[in-house]
Amino acid sequence: MIKIKEIRFHGRAGQGVVTAADILAMAAFQAGKYSQAFPFFGVERRGAPVTAFARISDDFIRLRSQIYYPDYIVVQDATLLDIIDVAKGLKKDGKAIINTEKKPEELNINTDAEVYTVNATKIALDILGVPIVNTLMLGAFAAITKEVSLEALQQAIEKRFPPKLAEKNARAVEVMYKSLED
Amino acid sequence: MVTLGGHIKETGSTTKTKTGGWRTFKPVIHMDKCVDCGCCWIFCPDMSILRKDGEYSVDLEYCKGCGICSRECPTGAIEMVLEEK
Amino acid sequence: MATDVIHGSKAVAEAVKLCDVDVIAAYPITPQTRISESLAKFAATGAIRAEYIKVESEHSAMSACIGASATGARTFTATSSQGLAYMFELLFVASGMRLPIVMANANRALSAPLNIWNDQQDSVSARDCGWIQIYVETNQEALDSVIQAYRISENHEILIPSMVCLDGYVLTHTMEPVDIPEQDLIEKYLPPFKPALSLDPDSPITLGAFANPSTYMEFRYEQQKAIERSFKAIEAAGKEYGKLTGREYGLLEEYNLDDAEIVLITMGSLAGTVKETLASLNDRRIGLLRVRAFRPFPKDDVRRLLKDVDKVAVIEKDISVGLGEGALFSEIKSSLYGLDSQPSMAGFIAGLGGRDVTPEDIAGVVKKVEKGFEGTGWVGLK
C-alpha cells in the first residue's frame, strides 16, 4: 500500500485556509510528488471555522474521504482551540503547528503529538501589512516537517498569486522558514 | 414519417391541412355595414379573412368557423351562419 | 502535454477550451460556479472564440443551447442540482430534437432541506431524459470525458446529448494533478462539428414541431436505437482517446475482478475511496466494478462480468424514495434477472447530502456482505 501523508488545516473563513491547502498541493507537485487538496465548507460566512485538507504521496491519490487521522495539523487561528478539538485524531508521531504568541505548554490542546507554536501574525503584520498567515504557516510547515522545500513553496506561491503579492508572500515565507531552521 | 428529431424539411407544409372542414358556422360579411377598419383581418387566427382594395372575403378552405372575426367586428357586419352540409 | 495541479472545475473548463466550442450558455450555481466563471473569463479574454451567452436561469441556459445547437453550433453548458432540475423539461427537448449538446453536471444534493454538498440524486433523477450520462472518478477523467462526449454525441449515427457528471466539491473543488493535452492532439481527435441538421434562413426547416399519437412512439423508438448505437461509440471514443493520450476509457471500469467473489459497484469519485480500501484489505476475492456509463446502461456487460460472482454490493449516492433503494441497484438487479446462478445482492445508500464516505464505511459494507447481508441498507446513518 502506498504511504500518504495527510495534513489538516484549521482556520476561519476569510483567512485563506483553503488557499493554504491548495498551495501546499501545488508545492508538493512542483517537487515531483502527487498531491491533492480539498476544502470542507460549513456555513459560508466570514469568521466561521473552516477546515481544508491536503494529501501528499509518491503515487496518484485515489482516496477521497476527509482526513480523520492526520499526520500534521496546521492551525491558523489559536482562538479555535477553545471551540473545536483541532487535534482530534492527530497521529501520536504527528505534529501540530499553531499560530500563537504562546508557548506549546501554555496551550490547552489535547494531543500526545509534538506541538509547535509560531508567531505568524507578527511576521505577517511586519511584511505583508495584514494579519493573513496562510502562506506563513506553510513556511513553518515546510521548516518543521521537511515535507516540502522552501523553494517549491515559493514557486507555488508565485504561480498562485499576482506578482506583487507573490513577491511579498515569498519573502514572508522565507523569513518564517529561516527563523525555524536549526 | 419519422425524421431525425422530427424535423420537417418542406416549408409551408401546414397549408396541406385544410381546416375548413372543421367548421360548423361560417362567417358571412355584410359589406354594407363594413367600415374597412381591418379588425377581422387582424384578429383572425388562421389568416382566413382576405382583404383586397377595401373588399373583404373569407377563405373557406381554412376558416375553422371560430367566430372571432364576428366578435371583434365593431359594426356587427359579420354574421355567423350555420352551415348546411 | 502539460501537467498541472488544478480543480475539477478548471479541468472541465480546459476541456471545453480544447474542444473549440462555438456557444456557451450557463448560469452559475454552487458547486458548478467555477466552471462557468472560468469559461466566462476565457471568453472575455479571447482565450476561446466561443460566444458566451449570459442567461437569467438554467431553463434559459438549456434553451439557448438548444437554439444554438439547432443552428449547427457546438454548444456547452454546465449546471448542478436545482439548476438541472430547473432544466428538466428542456433536457427532453434537447434529446428529442437529437441535438449533440454537451453538459457538465456538478453532482449535488437537492432541496429540501437546502444542501449544497455532493450526492448524485440530481443527474440520477434525470436518467430517463434521453441523454448519455458519464460519471467520472477523477479530475483527469472529467477533462477527458468532456472531450470524448463531443465525439460521441456528434457522431451522425448517434446525435444524442451528453452529460458528464462529476461529484460536486469532491472533484469540482479538489486540486489534483491533471494532464492537459495539446490543442493539436485534440484537433486530430475531434474534427470540427458537422451538424446533421441546421436552421438556416436560406433553406428553412422546422425543428421540434409536432408528433401525434400516430408517430410519437416511433420517435422514442428511434432515440432508443440511437443511444444503443452509442455503446460502441463510447467504447471506440475511449479507445481512440487512449491511443492519443495513454488514457483509455470504456463503459465500465473493472478493478481486481479476475478472481473476485465479492464485487462492489459504484459510480463517480467514490470508486477511488473503494479502490484504496480494497488495496488496504489486500484480498483478491474482492473487486470493484465502476459504472462509467449510466446511460446507456451496459446491461449485457454487467451481466457477463457478474454472472459467476457470489455476492454483489452496490454503493450509491442517490435514493428512489418510495422504492427504498438507489437507481443503480435497481439497474444492476434488472441486468442480472433470470441468471441461473444469481449472485446475492445488496444495495447501500451512502453519502447523501455530502455525508463523508470513509474507507471504514466501505470496509463495513464488505464485512456485512461477507456475513451474508442481502437487500438494502444505509451507510453511516445516524
Image (cartoon, coloured by chain):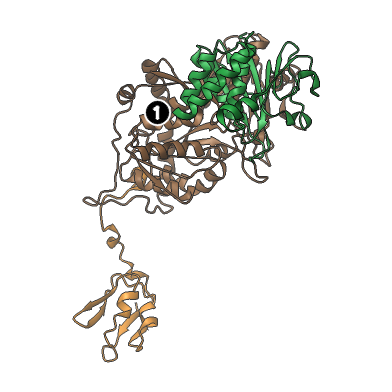
Chain colours: A green, B orange, C brown
* Quarter in which the N terminus of chain A is drawn: top right
Q: Nearer the viewer, residue A164 or A16?
A: A164
Q: Nearer the viewer, residue A176 or C252?
A: A176
Residue C131 rendering spot, x and y as whole percentages: 46, 38
Q: Quadrant of residue C180?
A: top left
Residue C264 rendering spot, x and y as whole percentages: 63, 20
Image height of C88 relative to C245, above or below? below
Mark 1 lies on a secondary structure that is helix
Would you say A14 lies left or right of C239 here? Answer: right
- Residue pointed to by mark 1: C147
Report crowding for label 1: few under 14, some 14 to 19, many 20 or more residues within 10 A (C-alpha): many
Residue B58 rendering spot, x and y as whole percentages: 27, 77
Q: Residue at x 37, y 70 (%)?
A: B22
Q: How many marks?
A: 1
Q: Is residue C344 visible?
A: yes
Residue A8 rendering spot, x and y as whole percentages: 66, 22
Would you say C300 lies left or right of C259 here? Answer: left
Q: Quadrant of residue A36?
A: top right
Would you say C91 lies left or right of C151 here? Answer: right
Q: Nearer the viewer, residue C151 or A127?
A: A127
Q: Is residue C340 visible?
A: no
Q: Amino acid at mark 1?
A: Ile
Image height of B67 relative to B19, above or below? below
Residue situated furthest left in the rendering: B53
Q: Residue at x 60, y 19 (%)?
A: A176
Residue situated furthest front in the rendering: A126
* Quarter in which the C terminus of chain A is drawn: top right
Q: Quadrant of residue C179?
A: top left
Q: Chain of mark 1?
A: C
